[in-house]
Image (cartoon, helix red, strand yellow):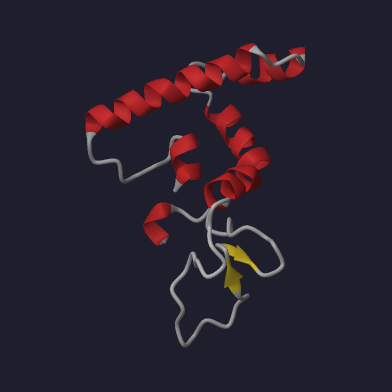
Amino acid sequence: DIGDIIRGKDLYIRNKQEKDRLEKNLKKIFAKIHENLNDIEAKTYYNSDAPDFYQLREDWWALNRVQVWKAITCKAERDDKYFRESSSNKGCTYEKCHCIGGDVLTNFDYVPQYLR
């Protein structure tokens, strides 16, 4: 859900004041990122999306989601799991909130929240 929050698509923040404050902070953060873009074409491209910068947020998330997941799970212990085990779990084995191959579990990032 952190990806939804960053991209401005979170459906479940119930406290309006908290949501407004979070959105205000995200706008400031992404305005700063936009301000520091060195590529004139990129800066111009994202200008049309100001002040919300939703496209910049989408692109930032696409480029950084794996690193964000690694940061979130860096203290995960060996037996920590992201999903509960079930008899139908035939997918990869999860260890330290990662697949055994080391891939991070970001496969739900683009599934709409109401379907998860």
Q: Identify which residue is drawn at 55% across, 62% down.
A: 97
Q: Residue at x 69, y 16 (%)?
A: 37
Picture quadrant where residue 62 is located: top right
Point out residue 34 in the picture as x, y percentages from the top left corner.
61, 17
Q: Position of residue 47 (x, y in %)?
A: 60, 15
Please report the residue visible at 50 percent of the width from the left and 67 percent of the height from the top: 81
**Residue at 57 percent of width and 63 percent of height:** 96
Image height check: is 39 above or below 20? above
Give the mark count: 0
| Left or right, residue 54 beside residue 99 | left
- Determine which quarter of the picture holds residue 42: top right
Q: Quadrant of residue 105?
A: bottom right
Which of 82/39 is in front? 82
The residue nearer to you, when weighing 34 against 55, is: 34
Residue 69 image point, x, y percent: 57, 49
Residue 8 is situated, as x and y percent measured from the top left of the image, at: 44, 35
Position of residue 12 in the picture relative to residue 99 (left or right): left
Residue projecting furthest to the bottom: 87
**Image vertical order of residue 47 relative to residue 78, above or below:** above
Q: Quadrant of the C terminus?
A: bottom left
Q: Nearer the viewer, residue 86 or 14?
A: 86
